[in-house]
Amino acid sequence: MGSEMGAQAARARAVAVLRIRGRALAVALLPAAAAVILVAGGTSGHLPGPGWDAARAVVSAVALVVLIAAGVIALVVARARPAVSPTVPIAEDAAPDLYRLVRDLADRLDVPAPSAIALTPDCDSWLEDRTHPAHGPPAREERDELADPSGARRPHRRTAAPVLVIGSPFLWWMRVGELRAVLAPVVAGTGPSAHPDIAAARRFVRGLDAAVATAADRGRCPAFRLACAGIGWVARLLLRSCRQHAAEMERGVAAAAAERAQAVDYGVRIVAQEQVGLAYAGWDRLLTRVALPAWRMGRWPSRLDAGVVAALTELSRRDRLAEGFATRLGERPACDLLEEPGTVDEAASLLAARLFHGGPAECGPDWAPVDWSEYPEEVVDRKWRTDAARLHRVLDALGVRRTPDPTAHDPNGPTLSRVLDHLATPDRADHGSPPGPHAAQPTHAPHRPHSGHEDPGPTEHPGPTEHSDAPQHPGVPQHPGDLRAPAPEIGTDWDADADADADIDADPEAGADTPRPAALAARLSAELAREEAAAPSAPAPGTASSGQAGPDALWDVGALPLFPLQPPRTERELLADHVTAMVCCAAMDTAGAQPGLDWLDGPTLLVGGERATDLAPRVLSLVEDGDPGPLRAWLSDLGIRPEKPVRLV
């Protein structure tokens, strides 16, 4: 370890953590020491009598119990599996240039080289210790791939160097020089990590954390749960005792690494940090606006990292502040350091879908990859038509009559006029609407349709695939943080209140007091909740596929998604999304519009090859104010006929 001030401070804090471990050991051995003294005194004749005999028996029994408990706790702390980040491992033969870059960087910094390289679908980089036996790689990989490029195996000695985890968006957006500058302070952290005191303190803290997680497992018999409760209490007590020292130790390690890395590409690093922020913004936008709709439709984009480049390039074209970044695209990208960038991008994209959405680990008919060129048809078109079908199912359940068009092939087909007339306030229902049969139809029926009704609709709880030949929610495990849920409580509140919402909507008295948009939005939320509850959960995979990020046994697949995006969507926003989908379906079926992909905004409607950017405020005017005038005028200007039936899924 170097002479940096941060390194010395980190070592001092590591010693403090080890002192706490030593004190805990001393407390565990104290009864045994007292028992030894009493037994020795009795053997030598210095402590005779029945009182000392009783004391020897009691203290010896207590010492035995304490030693057994301490041994069990020490065994759990040593054997408990520490948490490991889900990553995509990169072997040296798959990225020899990247390994050479990191190895040269470690030589310039005069620190040990990382033992391996892995990618994570996030805009961050760090070192991760995977020397625990539970994280041990197969025998053929038990070598230091960076420090020992010759491949000589050392079966009797495990390497202590940590694994370098790199954010996959960095490889595609950054240039080679920028990536080297960003990784310099990260790789420099292997120097302090190799110090014995710091390594021992980190192992102790990770073991305590893993022991707490192990003790929290409730899937045990009552006797084991009682023992685990005691183990967890001791582990938490020790963690609280060394928490401050461990945090200061990590700060010291980071400060020492940053100080050592100042001599390597310091000027380039200042510029590269700007690219880190830009990549993070583009990655977040791509996940929430582009990838999330695809994941909800059972499709996962297989080139997310390449999409980051397209999104940031589009940003540089639109934003004058980002014009300077476009000149970087002529330099060599860091993804050229990989032998097969497409394969790595696909593996990272699938891992991102698992972490942020909770999708299955393997492809299937309900969870398939989608290329960017197929995104408009496979995702955008299906999403709009699925939402439009759900909207009309809810209108059927509310008893809203259809608006027949005698001139259409399917006179009773779903139309946009039905939605406009229902959401419009009574004084604005016919304002600006073209004459037609739908103008004379009632827009709301306060009771549910029964058998024998002249316009039968679906049942109160329609199936999720009633109007679709593909499942609505294909094979995604239901989790409280599911991205499709407008709120985290969807699995506990809306499922229980779905029938109550239906009764309120069906009550004529409640219908007179509740605005139509609010009632429709509530029913849409309940319908989504029912569909999510009916969707089958994805089974945990037994083995990892060839493109996966390592064995699933290293992290809890039952906790997926680990990092749910959870965009907050209120009921009104949900209604606005469904109305927008219906408008887009009408535009595609009656005016020749096309579904499109915008790298910054996600699904978009293309009218005459141009993005329709002025639709959102007109939809909000209808949903929030009950005024269909602006939307009808927009439809009339583009030649969209709301009275014509549209095709649903």
Image (cartoon, rainbow, N blue to C red):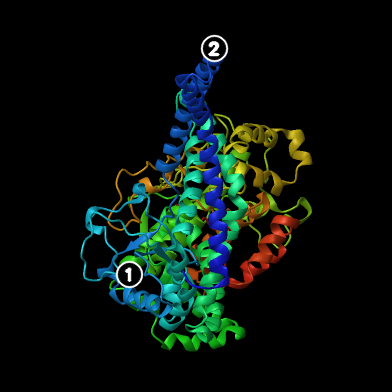
Q: Is residue 456 visible?
A: no
Residue 505, horizontal then vertical, whole percent: 68, 37
What's the mark number on residue 471? none
Q: Quadrant of residue 305?
A: bottom left
Mark-to-mark CA distance, 1 and 2: 82 Å
Q: Residue at x 69, y 52 (%)?
A: 423
Quarter of the view holding residue 157: bottom left
Tell me if 496 is positioned left or right of 332 in this view: right
Q: Amino acid at mark 1?
A: Gly
Residue visible at 51% across and 19% down in the picture: 56
Whole-percent x and y of residue 150?
21, 70
**189 up-or-down from 542: above or below:** below
- Check disc 2 and give the amino acid type: Gly
Label placed on residue 49: 2
Q: Residues within 10 Å of mark 2 (few under 14, many from 20)?
A: few
* Image position of 457 with respect to 115: above or below: above
**Which residue was labeled with disc 1?**
342
Image x and y of residue 306, in percent: 41, 72
Q: Nearer the viewer, residue 179 or 204?
A: 204
Label 2: element kind: loop
Q: Is residue 163 left or right of residue 2?
A: left
Coordinates of residue 212 in the picture (x, y in percent): 52, 40
Secondary element under disc 1, as helix, strand or loop, is helix
In the depicted view, which residue is nearer to us: 76 or 469? 76
Viewer-nearest residue: 243 or 450: 243
Q: Is residue 531 above or below residue 357?
A: above
How many marks overall?
2
- Determine crowd level at label 1: few under 14, some 14-19, many 20+ residues with C-alpha closer than 10 A: some
Q: Nearer the viewer, mark 1 or mark 2?
A: 2
Q: In this view of the protein, can residue 95 be seen by the observer?
A: yes
